[in-house]
Amino acid sequence: MTHKISVFIPVLNEEDKIRDALESVKWVDEIVVVDTGCTDGTMDIVRQYTDRIFTLSFQGFGDLRNQAVGFCSHDWLLSIDADERCSAELQREIQDVIRQDQAKDAYFIPRRNYFMGREIRYCGWYPDYCQPKLFRRGALTYHDDMVHEGFDIHGAVGYLNHDVLHYSFRDLSQVIDKMNNYSTLGMQKMVQQQRPSSMASALLHGMAAFLRIYLLKRGFLDGWAGFVIALGNFEGTFYRYAKSADYYRRINDDDSANKHQRNHGHTAQK
């Protein structure tokens, strides 16, 4: 096995973020960018750094990441999103660890989050080990989930010490847009799992999400940023369950209408 690294970066209209992400990983041996339908200037920037560009229709984050892994050429893989940055300290640690004879097969990397102009220390946002970001080829498989994709690890697991820096939102409009998008993807995941909901369930789950972030995870210590994060979790959770409830309501209404139409037609024939 060689010590070469491929990094893969999924993108969708990231022209305000992608250059910094690419600059932070230009030390790797291969940069793979997966375009899921950019309509802004993202790809013009990307072409300045790599020609390893692939276009996919979005079928969920799990499918997207599995396909991105398949596009990579080297034995070590690094997953970076457009709003993340590989710090210089993390670069050196990665380069050192993959050369060790005792190197693990997959590594979790702490993610240091920034929001509303400040580092978020609470809210459950640090160390934020969301999923292994450095792994050997074949050591990790993503589940085919629409969002918040799970994963299976095939081998030994380790933890790195230095951070990926995460700048998730430029402004509150992006918070709202992501909440709306992710709640729809979450609803689709619930439908796939045949998990019907109700508006009461949506409210209860939303309130639980707010209290977990703001009180249990001590988001109140992050000031207004912590409150906005907790509120965003309330909204994202509430609308995920509410959209599921609305989906099943519409299905039931359509079934009732079709049943009524069939009965009406049968009566008319008599």
Image (cartoon, rainbow, N blue to C red):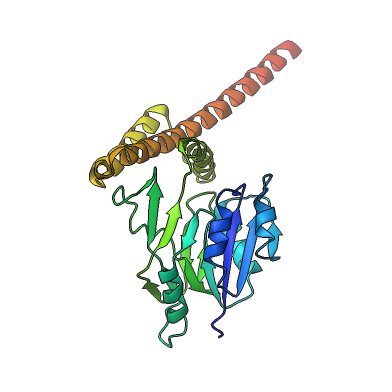
Closest to the observer, 167 or 134: 167
Residue at position x 62%, y 72% in the image: 30
Q: Which corner quadrant of the image does residue 71 belong to?
A: bottom right
Q: Quadrant of the N terminus?
A: bottom right
Q: Residue at x 47, y 73 (%)?
A: 154
> Is 91 situated left or right of 5 in this image?
left
**Observer-nearest of 200 and 212:** 212
Q: Is residue 55 above or below residue 161?
A: above
Give the x, y percent position of residue 110: 37, 63
Q: Quadrant of the C terminus?
A: top right
Q: Is residue 61 left or right of residue 103?
A: right
Nearest the viewer among 206 and 11 is 11
Quarter of image, res 241:
top left
Q: Is residue 196 visible?
A: no
Residue at image position (50%, 69%) is: 140
Outermost right residue: 269
**x and y percentages locating residue 20 in the rendered image:** 54, 57
Percent x, y for residue 138?
A: 54, 74
Camera-side residue: 69 or 90? 90
Query: Residue 269, relative to residue 125: is it above or below?
Result: above
Q: Count of labels shown?
A: 0
x 43%, y 58%: residue: 165
Is residue 90 in view? yes
| Direction bottom: furthest residue | 101
Residue 55 lies, in percent from the top left, at 70, 56
